[in-house]
Each structure stands twice: as C-alpha cells, then as structure tokens.
Amino acid sequence: MSHKEIRKNPFTNEWIIYSEARQARPDRKEDFCPLCSGSPEVPEFIEPIRIPNKFPALEIGNDPKKISSGEFRTKMSNYGKCELVVYTNIHDAKFIDLSNEEIFQIFQKWMEATKEYSLDKNIKYILPFENYGEDVGATLIHPHGQIYGFPMIPKEIEKELDAVKQFNKKNNSCMFCNYIEEEQERDERIVFQDNNLIALIPYFARHAYDVFVYPKRHVNFLHQCTRTEMDSFISTIKQIIVSLNNVFEKDVSYSLSLHQSPLNTQGSNMFHLYFKIHTPQRNTKSLKLLGAVETSTKTYINGMLPETAANILREKMS
Ligand SMILES: [Zn+2]
Ligand SMILES: [Zn+2]
C-alpha cells in the first residue's frame, strides 16, 4: 500500500500533497486507450461522464484532521477527490472541436461535482480543469479533463480570498468587480468582451499569454450563471484557444481552469469566479520554462507586457 499524506511547510504555510501511488503509474500500452468506449473504465459512452481517477493524488479516507508533532511537522491524512471527465468517444478529437452543446455538458459535470463536493464539509476547494498537450503534462490523448477536490484551500486561492476580504472590509464592494470596471475604462488589456463577460490578460500576468475570463456579474459559482452567460463563456474560451493557436501557428499546449469560491469557508461569497487559460508558449519557437528565479522565489519574469500580448491576441480574435 503506497503512502499518501499532506504536509505543511511551517515557513510558508503551504500544503504539499504526497502520493506515492502516482509514481507507480504504469507506462501505457500504445494501442490501448482507457478512455475509449468499450474499455473497463468507459463501457459505453452516451454523453460526457465523470469517472474516478485510477491514480488519485487525493482520495476520500479518514477525516483530514491536522496532526502536529512539534513546531515543524504538521500533517493531515490524505483526503479529497480526483476525477476525470471524459468528453467524447472520439479518441483524437480536441476540446476546441467539440460543439457548444458538448462543452455545455462538460460544464454541467463541473457544476454537478461542485454541488456534490460542497456537501462534504471536509472539502474546501474544487478545481475543474482541462489540460491539453505534452507541455502542460497531459499524458492521455483522449479528450478529457480533471476535477480535484482539496481538503484545504490552496495557498494561491487563500491569498486571493484574503485580498478580496480586505478590499471588501475597506470598500464594501467586490475587488474583482472593481478591477473589471477599471480594465474596461482603461481598455488596454482586453482581448474580448460582450454583455456577459470580459476576457483580458491581467495587468499582473505571470506568463505572456495568461488570459483571464470574468463574468461581468458578481457570481461565486458556475451554477449561478445563466445559460446565456454560459454560452458566452463557451464560445469565447474556444475562440481564445483557436486564436492562441493562430498566434503561434501550432496547436499550443494549454490549461483551462475554473476558479470558483472556496467551499465550506466563511466569506467565500466575496469571491468572483473566473476562468484562466494558461499556455507556457511564449513565441513560435519556445516555451517559458520556470527557471531558478521562479522556482526559488515564485517571482516571475515575464518577457512581454500584458498590453502587448493582449494587442497581438485581440487581432487574431474574429
Ligand atoms: Zn481513446
Ligand atoms: Zn464581483
């Protein structure tokens, strides 16, 4: 039985997930796809489905109580959820080739999982995402995404939640809503907008082409969005990925993640959801690899101003 636990770094208050099972993932046989219909995991494909991740980093076990052995060793038992969402039975299809209706069905799975996970008081954050391409670590070609349910709020999200809480205390309004308004006024980094959403490369983007897509209305969760808002998200996200492919003249590797409010957490109604599209691609030839500065200090060096990248990407949007 392989060992799994979650440990805390007392210097940074970050949690690190240890899961030895993941090292034991077998090399896949080239001619076998576990996600094609007819496989043991997907006997028959009718519509997008959620299936358990066979090599989960997190899984439901004993309650995730924090145990401290002295000042420096705090851990909790491994707890959480890891699922896959299989999008289609067409092995070599891509997310961007799926119809809007098919993507809506995928979003429905994300919403369904959010509602389900929130009933488990031990789950504090859910991250649905789509990884495409080797450069972001996708190991299976068959179109699929993943859903993680964490027993803690990941540090990055906790920092955002702290910032919005502080802003709210001072201004009695949503920091994200205010930020979106200012970006609209300045109109320097907007890639696309309509009545429902705004897509932009933020003032503080870590990577050249990190695109954030915010609903204009203050919503915490995807299931609070209307079908019209959802349709805007779907067509805009597809168009952004197609435009990135056009900028780099290739199928870029990317991740698409949905950032919603933390679950079972006080003050989480102050969070404003957004989608994030990230590609490590920085020009047609090379990727932005994380170097010593980034890995040692988490201070990012970005070779392109967000306004420049937004201009380039906006021109490709049609
Ligand atoms: Zn397949
Ligand atoms: Zn808001």
Image: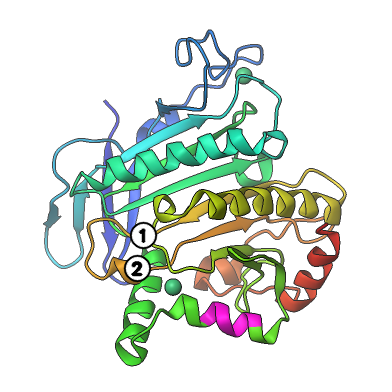
Q: Is residue 285 visible?
A: no
**Circle 2/circle 1 CB separation < 8 Å:** yes
Taking depth in this image into account, of 241 and 297 the one nearest to the observer is: 241
| Image quarter where ligand 1 lies | top right
Residue 113 image position (x, y, % from top left): 36, 40
Left or right position of 102 against 74: right
**Looking at the image, is 80 positioned above or below residue 10?**
above
Quarter holding residue 206: bottom right
The residue positioned 53% from the left and 52% from the top of the image is 257
| Quarter of the figure that contains the N terminus | top left
The residue positioned 65% from the left and 86% from the top of the image is 185
The colour style of the image is rainbow
Left or right position of 26 against 115: right
Q: Give the extent of the magenta segment.
A: 179-184
Q: Is residue 313 visible?
A: yes
Q: Which mark is residue 267?
A: none
**Which residue position holds label 1?**
154
The residue positioned 45% from the left and 62% from the top of the image is 273
